[in-house]
Image (cartoon, grey):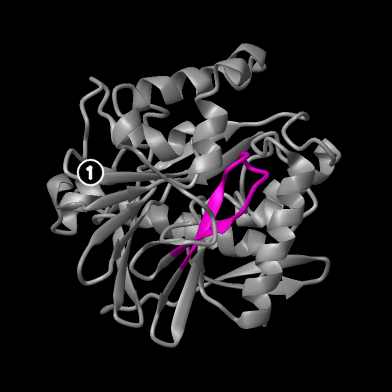
């Protein structure tokens, strides 16, 4: 016999009330207020990858958040992903690449400078058994604050003093331009000033790279403009296996993979970002190539498949050993 939802809830409530009314003492079970450490290891060939959780940002959104979609459709997409209608939950997940000879960190998280719910990179790096001094190189995908702020502490001290810093040349040229700063909108002017804070006194030591070049053993930069002018994704290859870390090619997958034509205000050139997004998502879907996404649900590792007019993120099954 089928039991109605109302009857099931009423029965459960009565049972709970009866349990609470018993006179016999009930053992207490204190609730824990912490999670396990946020790191996850996996492999591509002989390369060991570690996704490192830096927390998340509950970003308030409104009808201007997606330039070219009705707000009602955006709210429905959020509801379909079990998120509030006016808030986008954005995780931050830098990726550590251990090539066997070098430890390369792709992006550095928020440095605890964007939201109280973010800034756990260093704690999770320590939990993974790695100190900041053990990082040989930092590779930056784009100069938005959630990718570069982790280079410095809140007191502006360098967090990874032994690491070589590698950045896309066109990204560097755009954000360090005085003319671009003078012409910047109110939305992006703080980003320009933040770039100057992060990279002050580092200019001569920062190595600039071009897309389509191998920037570290097994790591090739892939041009992915649109989100920012010089934004890059990265292909990681070992033996016959490869992975594409999308970085910000696709922001939250349940909005912008499912609706690849949408142009969020986070993408500085919306039309170009759409073109890039479709190009790279088509590639990984056709090649059945694993991916990581910086703003995907942690650990952000899995595959992309085509679904209707868009794409769907299929998380990889959790593995106890890499």
* Span of residues in magenta: 220-235
Looking at the image, the residue that sits furthest to the bottom is: 240
Say whether residue 63 is visible: yes
- Position of residue 110 relative to residue 321, above or below, is above
- Position of residue 186 relative to residue 94, above or below, is above
Q: Which of 1 and 191 is in front in this view?
A: 191
Q: Image quarter for residue 52?
A: bottom left
Say whether residue 111 is visible: no
Instruction: Measuring from the top left, give residue 128's x and y in whole percent.
Output: 19, 59
Instruction: Measuring from the top left, give residue 86's x and y in whole percent.
Output: 66, 34
Residue under numbered circle 1: 122
Residue under the image location 21 percent in, 36 percent down: 159
Residue under the image location 38 percent in, 75 percent down: 318
- If the image is split into quadrants, where does the N terminus sit? bottom right
Is 134 a magenta residue?
no
279 sits to left or right of 146: right
Instruction: Measuring from the top left, give residue 256's x and y in whole percent.
Output: 69, 53
């Amino acid at each position: 016999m089928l039991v109605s939802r109302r009857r099931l809830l009423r029965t459960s409530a009565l049972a709970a009330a009866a349990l609470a009314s018993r006179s016999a003492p009930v053992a207490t079970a204190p609730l824990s207020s912490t999670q396990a450490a946020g790191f996850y290891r996996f492999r591509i060939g002989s390369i060991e990858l570690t996704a490192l959780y830096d927390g998340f940002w509950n970003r308030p959104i409104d009808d201007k958040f997606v330039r070219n979609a009705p707000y009602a459709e955006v709210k429905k997409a959020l509801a379909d992903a079990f998120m509030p209608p006016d808030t986008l939950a954005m995780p931050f997940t830098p990726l550590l690449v251990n090539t066997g000879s070098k430890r390369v960190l792709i992006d550095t998280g928020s440095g605890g400078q964007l939201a109280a719910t973010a800034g756990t990179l260093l704690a999770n790096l320590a939990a993974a058994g790695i100190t900041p001094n053990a990082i040989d190189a930092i590779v930056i995908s784009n100069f938005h604050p959630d990718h570069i702020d982790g280079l410095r502490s809140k007191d502006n001290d360098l967090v990874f003093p032994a690491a070589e810093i590698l950045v896309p040349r066109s990204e560097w040229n755009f954000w360090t331009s005085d003319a671009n700063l003078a012409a910047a909108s109110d939305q992006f002017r703080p980003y320009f000033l933040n770039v100057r804070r992060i990279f002050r006194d580092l200019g001569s030591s920062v190595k600039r790279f071009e897309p389509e070049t191998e920037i570290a053993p097994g790591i090739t930069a892939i041009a992915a403009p649109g989100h920012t002018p010089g934004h890059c994704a990265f292909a990681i290859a070992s033996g016959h296996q490869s992975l594409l870390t999308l970085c910000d090619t696709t922001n939250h997958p349940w909005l912008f993979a499912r609706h690849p034509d949408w142009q969020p205000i986070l993408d500085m050139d919306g039309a170009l970002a759409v073109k890039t997004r479709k190009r790279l998502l088509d590639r990984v879907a056709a090649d059945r190539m694993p991916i990581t996404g910086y703003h995907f649900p942690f650990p952000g590792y899995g595959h992309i498949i085509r679904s209707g007019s868009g794409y769907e993120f299929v998380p990889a099954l959790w593995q106890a050993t890499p």
